[in-house]
Image: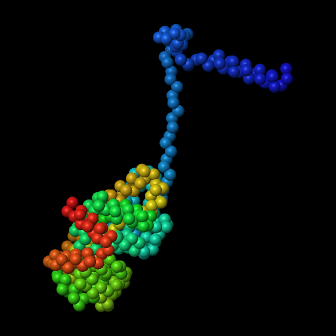
C-alpha cells in the first residue's frame, strides 16, 4: 500500500467505528409502514431532544450625543429641562449617553444652530427667535400674545397643527424639532410701574437684539434699545436703558432687583425653548434609542414649565417680603393685546400668518 491509500483506509475505519457508535441517543422508534412502528433495543429509554443553540441579541451600538444650551446651572431650563432629557434617555438602557455643555460653552445661539446644522452638536435647546435666523416662520412662536400659557405651548407642539412648522424647518435646515416648552412669561421691569401701553412712552426699554423681539417692542409701542443679556445689569445701573423685559427666573439670575424698582406682570410673551436635533444624527439612532431621547424630551416638556412656575412663585414671594421689587399685578393685558394683534398680522408674511393661525387654533385645548 502506498502512503495515501493507507491513510484513506485508516480514515474509513474511523468513520465506520463512529457510525456504529452513533446510534445511541437517536430516535427511539423506526417507522416501517404508515401508522406502524417497531420497537428498537432502546425503546424503553426516554426520548431525548437536541437543544437548539442559544443566541444572544447584539447590544445596540453606543451613541454619545452632545447637548448644548445657554443657561446657567440651577435654572429650570437646566434642572428640569436638559438634565431630565439626559436622565430619562440614559435610564432606558439602550446605549445612549448624553454629554451636556451649558452656559453657551459651545457658542452663542447663532453659532450653535449652525453647529447643529453641520452635525458638530447633536442636540440643542434654543429660543424660537434664534431659530428664526435660519427659518423665518419660526419667529411667530416668540410673538407677543401669540401663546396664552404653558398649556397652550404644549398643546401646539404636541399636535398635528405644528407639523407644517416642524416639516418646513427640517426641509430648510436638515434639523428636526423634538419638542418645546415654555420657560416663563416675559415681564416688564423699570423704575416706574407699567400698567398700560401708554406707560411705555418715554422709556428706553431694553429688548434682545433679535428681529422677533424688536417687532414685539414696536407692536407694544416701546422704544427698544438693543443690549446683550450679559451687559444688561450694567446698562440699567448706568442708566443707558430705563427698563427691560424678561422671564422672572432670568430677572433673578442676574440680580436685576438690585437695579430696578418695579416688576409689572404683563406676561406679554411666552418664552419658548425648542429642543432640536441634527437630522443625520437622529437617523443614525436605533428606533429604541430615538424613543428614549423622545421620552426624555416629553418628560422635560412636562416638568420644565412646572419648575419654572414654582420658581416664579417663590421669587415673587421673596420680593414681596423683602421689598426688593414692588410687584405690579394689575397690568391691563387686554389693552396691550388689542394693540399688538393687528400690528403683528400686518407685519407678518403669509407663511408666518399660517403659523399664527395654527398656534391660535390650539388655544384652550
- Quarter of the image for the C terminus: give it: bottom left
Residue 216 image offset from top left, x and y in percent: 28, 79
- Going by the picture, which residue comes out furthest to the right? 2
* Residue 318 seen anywhere in this rendered image of the structure: no
Q: Quadrant of residue 355?
A: bottom left
Q: Quadrant of residue 15?
A: top right
* Residue 286 relative to residue 191: left or right: right
Residue at image coords 34%, 65%: 165
* Residue 239 relative to residue 7: left or right: left
Q: Quadrant of residue 344?
A: bottom left
Residue 10 image offset from top left, x and y in percent: 76, 21
Q: Which is more toward the observer, 36 or 330?
A: 36
- So how many labels did they put on this image? 0
* Residue 163 seen anywhere in this rendered image of the structure: yes
Q: Which is more toward the observer, 254 or 130?
A: 130
Residue at image coords 19%, 76%: 337
Rendered position, 151 above or below 53: below
Residue at image coords 49%, 67%: 118
Residue 9 image offset from top left, x and y in percent: 77, 20
Name the image colouring. rainbow
- Going by the picture, which residue comes out furthest to the front? 350
Q: Which is more toward the observer, 167 or 29?
A: 167
- Quarter of the image for the N terminus: give it: top right
Residue 88 image offset from top left, x and y in percent: 37, 56
Residue at image coords 28%, 74%: 143
Rendered position, 182 above or below 52: below
Amino acid at each position: 500500500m502506498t502512503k495515501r491509500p493507507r491513510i484513506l483506509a485508516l480514515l474509513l475505519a474511523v468513520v465506520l467505528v463512529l457510525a456504529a457508535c452513533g446510534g445511541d441517543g437517536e430516535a427511539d422508534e423506526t417507522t416501517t409502514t404508515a401508522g406502524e412502528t417497531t420497537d428498537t433495543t432502546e425503546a424503553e429509554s426516554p426520548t431525548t431532544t437536541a437543544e437548539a443553540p442559544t443566541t444572544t441579541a447584539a447590544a445596540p451600538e453606543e451613541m454619545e450625543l452632545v447637548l448644548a444650551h445657554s443657561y446657567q446651572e440651577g435654572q429650570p431650563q437646566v434642572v428640569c429641562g436638559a438634565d431630565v432629557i439626559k436622565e430619562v434617555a440614559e435610564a432606558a438602557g439602550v446605549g445612549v449617553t448624553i454629554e451636556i455643555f451649558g452656559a453657551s460653552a459651545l457658542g452663542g445661539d447663532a453659532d450653535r444652530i449652525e453647529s447643529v446644522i453641520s452635525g458638530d452638536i447633536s442636540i440643542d435647546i434654543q429660543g424660537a427667535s434664534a431659530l428664526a435666523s435660519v427659518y423665518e416662520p419660526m419667529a411667530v412662536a416668540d410673538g407677543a400674545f401669540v401663546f396664552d400659557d404653558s398649556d397652550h405651548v404644549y398643546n401646539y407642539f404636541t399636535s398635528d397643527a405644528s407639523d407644517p412648522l416642524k416639516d418646513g424647518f427640517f426641509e430648510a435646515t436638515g434639523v428636526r424639532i423634538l419638542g418645546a416648552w415654555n420657560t416663563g412669561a416675559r415681564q416688564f421691569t423699570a423704575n416706574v410701574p407699567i400698567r398700560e401701553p401708554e406707560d411705555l412712552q418715554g422709556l428706553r426699554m431694553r429688548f434682545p437684539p433679535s428681529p422677533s423681539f424688536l417687532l414685539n417692542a414696536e407692536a407694544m409701542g416701546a422704544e427698544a434699545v438693543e443690549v446683550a443679556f450679559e451687559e444688561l445689569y450694567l446698562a440699567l445701573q448706568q442708566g443707558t436703558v430705563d427698563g427691560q423685559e424678561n422671564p422672572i427666573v432670568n430677572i433673578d439670575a442676574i440680580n436685576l432687583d438690585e437695579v430696578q424698582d418695579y416688576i409689572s406682570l404683563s406676561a406679554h410673551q411666552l418664552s419658548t425653548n425648542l429642543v432640536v436635533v441634527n437630522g443625520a444624527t437622529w437617523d443614525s439612532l436605533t428606533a429604541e434609542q430615538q424613543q428614549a431621547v423622545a421620552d426624555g424630551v416629553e418628560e422635560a416638556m412636562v416638568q420644565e414649565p412646572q419648575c419654572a412656575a414654582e420658581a416664579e412663585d417663590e421669587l415673587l414671594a421673596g420680593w414681596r417680603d423683602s421689598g426688593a421689587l414692588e410687584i405690579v399685578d394689575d397690568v391691563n393685558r387686554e389693552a396691550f393685546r388689542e394693540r399688538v394683534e393687528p400690528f403683528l398680522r400686518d407685519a407678518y408674511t403669509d407663511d408666518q400668518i399660517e403659523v399664527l393661525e395654527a398656534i391660535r387654533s390650539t388655544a384652550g385645548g
